[in-house]
């Protein structure tokens, strides 16, 4: 099989490139783009250490996503950016659009998506190519939805269910995202209208291949936000399940009692994180994950699943491929897009398979 092209101009800047997922992305991209991968972050020493271990001409660079004043220097020679750090404001995305660069992010905040329409017009004018989401969800989940929509035709509903294990390896930003999402209600699109939903509520049994059925609860995964627009879905729901199963019941009780918000208001977030760290150590080695996306069309349900160990590894694989497509200009249309709008599902999953990840269809 012919390898995908890597020909294109400009360096690839991995912001947060020495983090849990970022360093994995760097390891996948560096051999494909020798001399063009830049490891960015606030800690120049960590970036330099990783570059030394990776080789392939990787270079370190200091960049702080919260300091837009130093972007001119940090983005010199860069053609593609992949962000692997949490951002309070989309300053880096705006900078990429203004400069006509390609950009993606493994975990864009919902707030970023709200201004996507205005940024889309700006990107079309500057020539910037942006993919909103290149992680597990959004990212791989979007490409599963695209694959299922291609098979189904008209899409009535889309549901993303993710099972994560406490003993797996996560970055601090991933943990922060989950904790923040548990604190407050969110908008869920169901039967053609938005309604208020409480996180970790409305449990439903989801059949995950290999792992069996698990109770999964509604959760504001970012991928479902745009399916009504990109796929025409009248219902789009995200769900989360955790391993071991007992933690779901405990967390559900805590959320219903308002514990996450109470801990935040009383300055006890640190204790919350320490408790989670103790649980992670207790379940070290338990790192199974599962991603299931289902589509309902004409009364028929089609599903696609990805099951394995080490969600950071599969997240990096998907993110590296979407970034490669941007850098190689295989995503050609300027604008701000969700992956399912401009990326071929066939090409994407073929690349994942080459990296050892096999997604299964249930028709």
Image: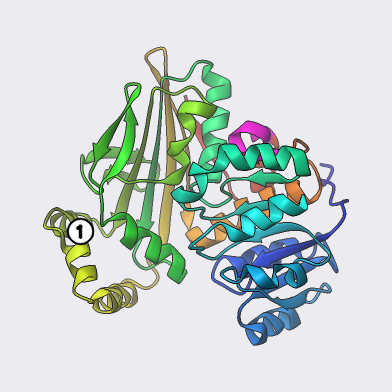
Give percent across and percent down for residue 312: 52, 62
| The magenta stretch spans residue 345 | yes
Image height of 308 relative to 75, above or below = above
Q: Which residue is mark 1?
A: 251
As drawn, the residue found furthest toward the bottom would be 45
Q: Name the one closer to the observer, 24 or 42.
A: 42
Query: Which residue is drawn at the image coordinates 51% and 44% (left, top)?
Result: 113
Q: Name the one closer to the observer, 77 or 326.
A: 77
The way the protein has been coloured in the rendering is rainbow
| The magenta stretch spans residue 218 | no
Give percent across and percent down for residue 308: 48, 53
Query: Which residue is drawn at the image coordinates 41% and 19% (left, top)?
Result: 156
Element at label 1: helix
Give percent across and percent down for residue 141: 50, 41
Query: Which residue is drawn at the image coordinates 23% and 76% (left, top)?
Result: 267
Number of numbered tags placed on the structure image: 1
Q: Name the one closer to the observer, 220 or 196.
A: 196
Q: Is residue 220 visible?
A: yes
Quadrant location of the N terminus in the rendered image: top right
Residue 214 relative to residue 342: left or right: left
Q: Quadrant of residue 2?
A: top right
Residue 303 relative to residue 45: left or right: left
Q: Name the one closer to the observer, 169 or 92.
A: 92
Image height of 193 relative to 113, above or below = above
Q: Which residues are magenta?
A: 335-346
Q: Quadrant of residue 158?
A: top left
Query: Which residue is drawn at the image coordinates 54% and 16% (left, top)?
Result: 153
Dot 1 alpha-carbon crowd within 10 angstroms: few under 14, some 14 to 19, many 20 or more: some
């Amino acid at each position: 099989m012919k390898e995908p092209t890597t020909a294109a101009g400009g360096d690839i800047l991995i912001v947060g490139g020495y983090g849990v997922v970022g360093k994995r992305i760097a390891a996948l991209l560096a051999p494909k783009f020798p001399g063009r991968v830049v490891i960015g972050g606030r800690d120049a020493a960590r970036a330099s250490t990783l570059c030394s271990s990776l080789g392939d001409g990787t270079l370190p660079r200091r960049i702080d996503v919260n300091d837009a004043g130093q972007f001119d220097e940090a983005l010199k020679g860069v053609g593609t950016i992949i962000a692997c750090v949490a951002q309070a404001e989309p300053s880096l995305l705006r900078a990429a659009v203004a400069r006509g660069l390609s950009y993606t992010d493994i975990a864009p905040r919902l707030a970023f998506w709200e201004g996507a329409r205005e940024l889309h017009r700006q990107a079309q004018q500057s020539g910037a190519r942006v993919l909103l989401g290149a992680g597990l969800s959004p990212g791989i989940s979007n490409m599963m939805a695209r694959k299922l929509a291609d098979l189904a035709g008209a899409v009535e509903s889309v549901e993303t269910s993710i099972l994560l294990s406490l003993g797996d390896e996560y970055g601090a930003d991933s943990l922060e995202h989950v904790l923040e999402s548990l604190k407050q209600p969110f908008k869920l699109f169901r039967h053609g209208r938005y309604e208020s939903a409480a996180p970790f509520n409305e449990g439903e049994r989801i059949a995950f291949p290999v792992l069996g059925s698990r109770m999964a609860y509604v959760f504001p995964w970012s991928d479902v936000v745009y399916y009504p627009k990109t796929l025409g879905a009248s219902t789009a729901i995200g769900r989360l399940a955790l391993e071991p199963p007992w933690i779901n019941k405990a967390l559900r009780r805590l959320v219903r009692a308002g514990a996450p918000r109470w801990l935040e208001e009383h300055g006890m977030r640190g204790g919350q994180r320490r408790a989670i760290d103790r649980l992670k150590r207790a379940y070290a080695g338990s790192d199974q994950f599962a991603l299931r996306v289902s589509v309902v069309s004409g009364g028929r349900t089609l599903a696609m699943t990805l099951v394995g160990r080490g969600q950071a590894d599969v997240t990096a694989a998907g993110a590296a491929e979407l970034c490669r497509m941007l850098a190689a200009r295989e995503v050609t249309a300027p604008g701000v897009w969700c992956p399912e709008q401009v990326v071929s599902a066939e090409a994407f999953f073929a690349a994942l398979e080459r990296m050892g990840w096999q997604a299964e269809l249930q028709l």
